[in-house]
Image (cartoon, rainbow, N blue to C red):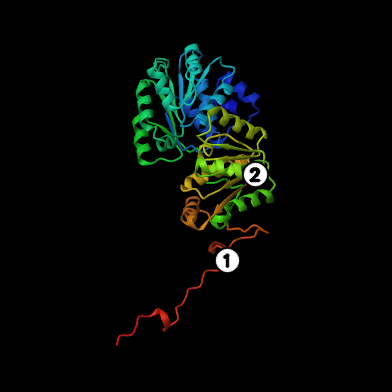
C-alpha cells in the first residue's frame, strides 16, 4: 500500500513524495483513512512510529487556506510544539496554509503577529494559547480539527484544567477531535469520553521496547557512578549518545564533568535552559556538532532525534514507563542501538519495576578493566547467610 492509495490531497501527496516516502507506517495506514472519513480517533502514542504524520497528512488534506485557525494541535512542551509545527509546514508547503507556533518562555509579539497575519494551523502549548485567547489574538470559531497530543504528559504537567478550558472554547458542532496518549489512566479515560464522539481506536504503539535495542544494567557503587560513565563512553564506538538524568542540576553537573574529562562536544538540555539555547543544542545534536546530549525527561518523549546509537541512563528512572520513552531515542526505524543503565544499590526496586514493565530481564554487566569498588551488586553468587556462633558475647547474661 502506497500513500497514493489513502485519499490524501494532491498538494499533500506531492510533499510526501518529495520527502522520499513510499509506503506509510502501520499507524499511518490505519489512521489516515479514518481521519479523512471524519471519525474522531483515540490511540496510544509512543514516538518513533510516524504518529505526527498520521494526523498531519489527513488534517492538511481536509482544509483550504482561509487565514483563520482551522486546525489546532496542543502539545505539552515547547520542543514538541516546535517539532510538530515544522512537520505541518513541511507537509503543507504546497497547500498555501500558514502555521502559527505558540509557546511560553519567549515574547508575545512575534506570536501575536503570526495570528494577526492569518494562520490556518495553530500548534501551541496550553498556557500560551489561553493567554493569547484572553488578549484577543486567538479565535476558535472556525476550528474544524482539534488534535490533543501526549495527553498523559499534559496531565502529569498539570495542564488538564487548561486543556479542558480550551476544548470548551472550540466549536462542539462539526468538530473532529484526535486524541493521543501513551497511557490511559482513569482521569484521561474520563476526559476522553467527555471530549470525543464515537471515536475509532487506533493502536499507534505498544508498551514495548524496540527489538533491535540491546539492554544492560551496569552495577556500580554510588561513589563510582561518574567514573563508570566516563569509562563506558571511552569503551564504545558511538555516533551520538543521549545521557538521561533525573534532575536539571544533575544534567548540568554531568555535562560539566564530561567536558572536564575531555568530551568537548557535549550539550545539556532541560527546562532551565532558555528556549533559543535548547533549540540550538537540539539542532547541533542532530547535525553532529554535539556528540553527547545530557538531558532530563524533557527530551525523552516526542522529540524526533534519529540516528542515536546509544542511550545511557545515569540513574534508573523512577517511573518504569520513562525507561521505554528514553530508550526509544535509539533503535528507531529498526536500526540497532544500545541502552545502558548505571545501577546502584538504592535503585534495585526501580530496576525491577523496569523489568516487569517491559516483560524482559535485563542483563547485568561488568566493564572490562574497570577498577570497581566493592558493592554487593557485583557478586555473581548469592550471598550466604551469616550464622552467629552459639554462646559467647552475643547472648544474654545468665541470671544468678
Considering depth in this image, is 221 or 35 the residue closer to the camera?
Answer: 221
Q: Is residue 335 visible?
A: no
Q: Which residue is mark 1?
A: 380
At label 1, counting other C-alpha atoms closer than 10 Å, the crowd grade (few under 14, some 14-19, many 20 or more) is few
Q: Nearer the viewer, mark 2 or mark 1?
A: 2
Q: Which residue is mark 2?
A: 260
Question: Furthest residue to the left?
Answer: 400
Point 53% across, 49% down: residue: 315
Point 68% across, 59% down: residue: 369
Q: Quadrant of the C terminus?
A: bottom left
At label 2, counting other C-alpha atoms closer than 10 Å, the crowd grade (few under 14, some 14-19, many 20 or more) is few
In the rendering, at what x and y percent does residue 334 appear?
62, 42
Q: Quadrant of residue 264?
A: top right
Considering depth in this image, is 128 or 214 the residue closer to the camera?
Answer: 128
- How far is mark 2 from mark 1, CA to CA? 34 Å
In the rendering, at what x and y percent does residue 100 appear?
50, 19
Considering depth in this image, is 346 or 30 the residue closer to the camera?
Answer: 346
In the rendering, at what x and y percent does residue 246 appear?
50, 44
> Going by the image, does 170 lie left or right of 387?
left
In the rendering, at what x and y percent does residue 259 appear?
64, 42
Q: Is residue 255 above or below residue 195?
A: below
Amino acid at each position: 500500500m502506497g500513500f497514493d492509495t489513502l485519499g490524501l490531497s494532491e498538494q499533500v501527496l506531492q510533499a510526501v513524495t518529495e520527502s522520499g516516502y513510499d509506503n506509510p507506517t502501520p499507524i499511518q495506514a490505519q489512521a489516515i483513512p479514518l481521519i479523512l472519513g471524519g471519525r474522531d480517533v483515540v490511540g496510544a502514542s509512543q514516538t518513533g512510529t510516524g504518529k505526527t504524520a498520521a494526523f498531519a497528512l489527513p488534517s492538511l488534506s481536509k482544509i483550504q487556506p482561509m487565514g483563520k485557525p482551522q486546525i489546532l494541535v496542543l502539545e505539552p512542551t515547547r520542543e514538541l510544539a516546535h517539532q510538530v509545527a515544522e512537520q505541518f509546514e513541511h507537509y503543507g508547503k504546497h497547500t498555501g496554509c500558514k502555521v502559527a507556533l505558540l509557546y511560553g518562555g519567549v515574547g508575545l509579539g512575534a506570536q501575536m503577529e503570526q495570528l494577526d497575519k492569518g494562520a490556518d494551523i495553530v500548534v501551541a502549548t496550553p498556557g500560551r494559547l489561553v493567554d493569547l485567547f484572553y488578549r484577543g489574538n486567538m479565535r476558535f470559531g472556525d476550528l474544524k480539527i482539534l488534535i490533543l497530543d501526549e495527553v498523559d504528559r499534559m496531565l502529569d504537567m498539570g495542564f488538564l484544567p487548561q486543556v479542558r478550558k480550551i476544548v470548551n472554547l472550540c466549536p462542539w458542532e462539526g468538530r473532529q477531535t484526535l486524541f493521543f496518549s501513551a497511557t490511559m489512566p482513569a482521569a484521561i479515560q474520563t476526559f476522553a469520553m467527555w471530549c470525543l464522539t464515537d471515536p475509532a481506536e487506533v493502536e499507534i504503539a505498544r508498551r514495548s521496547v524496540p527489538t533491535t535495542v540491546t539492554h544492560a544494567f551496569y552495577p556500580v557503587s554510588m561513589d563510582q557512578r561518574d567514573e563508570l560513565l566516563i569509562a563506558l563512553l571511552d569503551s564504545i564506538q558511538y555516533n551520538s549518545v543521549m545521557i538521561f538524568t533525573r534532575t536539571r542540576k544533575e544534567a548540568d553537573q554531568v555535562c560539566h564533568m564530561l567536558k572536564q574529562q575531555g568530551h568537548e562536544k557535549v550539550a545539556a538540555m532541560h527546562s532551565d535552559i532558555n528556549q533559543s539555547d535548547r533549540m540550538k543544542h537540539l539542532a547541533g545534536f542532530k547535525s553532529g556538532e554535539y556528540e553527547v546530549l545530557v538531558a532530563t525527561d524533557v527530551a525523552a518523549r516526542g522529540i524526533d532525534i534519529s540516528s542515536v546509537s546509544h542511550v545511557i541512563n545515569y540513574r534508573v528512572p523512577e517511573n518504569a514507563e520513562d525507561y521505554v520513552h528514553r530508550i526509544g531515542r535509539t533503535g528507531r526505524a529498526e536500526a540497532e542501538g544500545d541502552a545502558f543503565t548505571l545501577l546502584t544499590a538504592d535503585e534495585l526496586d526501580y530496576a525491577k519495576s523496569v523489568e516487569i514493565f517491559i516483560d524482559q530481564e535485563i542483563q547485568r554487566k561488568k566493564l572490562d578493566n574497570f577498577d570497581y569498588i566493592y558493592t554487593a551488586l557485583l557478586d555473581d553468587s548469592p550471598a550466604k547467610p551469616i550464622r552467629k556462633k552459639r554462646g559467647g558475647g552475643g547472648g544474654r547474661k545468665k541470671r544468678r
